[in-house]
Image (cartoon, rainbow, N blue to C red):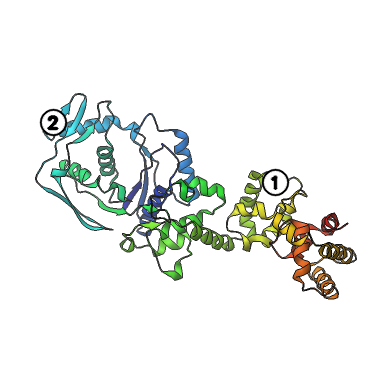
Amino acid sequence: MVTVRFAPSPTGYLHLGSARTALFNWLYARHMEGRFLLRVEDTDQVRSDVRFLEEILYDLRWLGLDWDSEPIYQSRRFPLYRQKAEELLAGGKAYREGEAILFRVEKGRAVEYDDFIHGRIAVRTDDIKDQVLIKSDGSPSYNFACVIDDAELGITHILRGDDHISNTPKQILFYEAFRLVPPRFGHMPLILGPDGAKLSKRHGGVSVEEYRNEGYLPGALVNHLILLGWYPGEEHEVMTLEEAVGMFDIAQMGDVQAKFDLQKLRWLNASHIMKRTSAELLPLIKSHLTAGGVPLSGVSDEFLLRLIDLYKIRLKTLRDFVEMTDCFFRDDFAVDEEGKKKYLAKPENIENIRLLAVRLEALASFAPAEIEAACRQLAEERGLKAAGLIHPARLAISGKTSGAGLFEMMELLGKEKVLRRLRGVAP
C-alpha cells in the first residue's frame, strides 16, 4: 500500500511551499487509496512551539487535508534514535566523537536512485562527509531521525522539495546500513516569486494563514498550489480537491520551477467564489465583516444574502466585500475623492441629483425596474445619456465610482436612505 507522510516543523506558520508538499502527498495517497501520515519534527526544543503546531494542523484541515492516524512526535522518540545509533556503533558502522555518535561514510562509491520527478540521480560518497547520528546534546540529526521514522512507519514514497535533494543520498546510506529498502524519492522544484527569486514576503504573503485572513477560499489556494507542479490541462484548470484526486498522476509532475502568481490566484479565487452559493459564503462573509469592524447588530441574514447575491460576481477575495459594501452598513462611508471632483463639482450634476430625488420620492414601488424607468426618463428629459445621471447618483449614495447595479443597490439600501443621501449632496 502506498504510504506517504508530511513532516512539519512547529517552528513557524505553515509556508506555502510546505502546504504544497503536504497537498501533493495527500493527493497521491488518496488517488492510490493509500495512507497519508503526519510526523511532527519537533526535535528543536528551543524553537518548537505548540501554538505553531496548532496553527499548522488548523491550516491543513482548512485546506481540506486529513490524515490517517494520530501524528507522531520526534521529541518523544529520542530513546529509539539512540538505540538505533548504538546498533550501528556496535556493528562498526559508526563511532563516538565525545558525546556525539557519527556514521562512517564509505568513500569511493556512488549513491544512485531514480527520482520520480528528475530521473536518475547519482552522488559520489567522496563528496559526503561522515554523518552525525546523535548530537552531543543527545538529540538526533535530521537525516537520521527521518530514516528511523520513515522505516518504522512503512513510508513507500517521499515527495518533498528540491531543497532536500542533498539529504537523500545521506539517508539512503542509513537505509543500506540497516539493510532496509529505501522508499521512492521525488523532489519538487521550489516555488518562486513572479521575478524568479525565491518566494518571500516581498511577493506577498508566504504563509497559509495570511491568505486565509485575506479572504481566499481554501479551494482556490489549493487549486493554485496544485497548478504549481502539475497541470491537468486547460479544461481542468479550475478544479476542486475532489476532482484533483481523481485526475492526479504523479508521473505528470513537472521538473521546472513554478512561479507563484498572485493575479492568477485572485482569478481562481473569484472562480471558486462564483461556484459557492450565497448561503455557503454567508458565515465567511460575516466573519470578514466582523473582523473589518462592520457593525452587524440588527442586520439580518436575509439582507446579507441579498447583498452577497449582488456583489458575489465582483469579488476577487472575501475581504473585498468589506470595502465594496461599506455604504450598506454606515452613513460615514469612504468617498472616492477623484470621483467627487469628476461627478459632484458641476452644478448641473447637483441639480440632476436633486431632480432625481424628487422623481424617486414619487414612486409607489421602489423596485429596480421602476427606479430605472424614472432615472432614464429624467435623463432623457434633461438631454443626458443615462450614464450622465447614474454615475453622479452612484457616488452620492455609495461614495464609489463603480459597484453593483445602481438600481438594485438603491432597492436594497431602501427608499428613505437613498433619498437622504441624494439630498445630502443636493439639498
- SS of the residue under disc 1: loop
Q: Which residue is drawn at 61% across and 56% down?
A: 280
Residue 109 pos. (x, y %): 10, 47
Q: Mark 2 points at which residue?
A: 90
Which of 97/40 is in front? Answer: 97
The answer to which quarter of the image holds residue 152 is top left
Which of 173/33 is in front? Answer: 173
Q: Which residue is drawn at 62% across and 55% down?
A: 281
Residue 328 to residue 180: above or below: below
**Crowd class of label 2 (few under 14; some 14 to 19; many from 20; radius 10 Å):** few
The answer to which quarter of the image holds residue 339 is bottom right
Q: Which residue is drawn at 42% across and 53% down?
A: 193
Which of 69/65 is in front? Answer: 65
Say whether residue 336 is visible: no
Residue type at mark 1 is Val
Q: Mark 1 points at which residue?
A: 294
Residue 98 to residue 152: above or below: above
